[in-house]
Amino acid sequence: MNTRNTYQKHTNQEHTNVDIRVKLLFLALGFIIMAALKPLIAEQIYNRAVLFYNAAMYKQSIKYLRKSLIISPRLPRSNLLLAATYENIGDYKKAIDIYLKYMRINPDDPQSYYYIGCIYAKNYKDYIKALSWFKTTIRVDKKHWQAYVWISICYKLLGKKEMALNNYLNMKKVFPQDKRIDRFINNLSQKLPM
């Protein structure tokens, strides 16, 4: 009877060892599958946030964008849309914070620099800070058309029309075929004192 109990204990221990290995295998597979599905899940949540954003349901959009960023914090579109959503509800400080966070993740993407400049120019009317951000945008992307235009607008609003004109002339060197710049230059030249 003793041998039988010993055999039974030995068999139970083998089953326990197999059960633990099987459980560990399934646990590892679960982690692998979850890692593979993370971007897809984040993308689905982002798409739901876009629907709410387009319907001007910003609080719901924020909720889903935050979920998306918990799953995949480096998702560029989620970061940018979250900041834009905060802009739409008038929380410019949070929008700037998110753009700054995104900047640390993607320092070579000029969008966050540009959008921070727009917030300072449009919402805070702080044209000096805006100029700094627009100039940084151009350092990151030499062909960022809108940043060039905003630099000239900020100079004009600061009363520095000569600097605005010089910026348009520099812009013309970067975009030689763009006829809109010629109109900007002509309009500003007519307003300058002779």
Image (cartoon, rainbow, N blue to C red):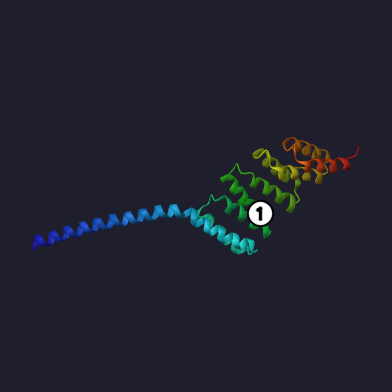
Q: Is residue 81 positioned above or below 52 on the image?
A: above
Mark 1 falls on what kind of element? helix
Query: Do we see residue 129 in this rendering?
Result: no
For image coordinates 51% across by 56% down, the residue present is 42
Q: Can you give x and y, in whole percent of width and height, for residue 39 in the image?
A: 49, 53
Could you tell me the amino acid type at mark 1? Lys
Quarter-of-image position of residue 171: top right
Left or right: residue 29 compared with residue 165:
left
Q: In this view, does 135 lie to the left or right of 29?
A: right
Describe residue 136's horizontal placement relative to residue 22 as left or right: right
Residue 17 point in image, percent of width and height: 24, 55
Quarter occupied by the C terminus: top right
Identify which residue is drawn at 71% across, 43% down.
145
Mark 1 crowd level (few <14, some 14–19, many ≥20, 10 Å Cα): some
Q: Where is residue 46 in the image (x, y as percent from the top left)?
A: 55, 57
Quadrant assignment, res 104: top right
Callout count: 1
Say whether residue 34 is left or right of residue 104.
left
Residue 79 vs 128, above or below: the answer is below
**Residue 142 percent location from the top left of the image:** 67, 38
Quarter of the image containing the N terminus?
A: bottom left
Residue at mark 1: 93
Along the line of sight, the residue nearer the viewer: 186 or 116: 186
Kindly tell me whether residue 100 is visible in this rendering. yes
Q: Nearer the viewer, residue 20 or 189?
A: 189
Outermost residue, right side: 194
- Residue at x 28%, y 54% (from the top left corner): 21
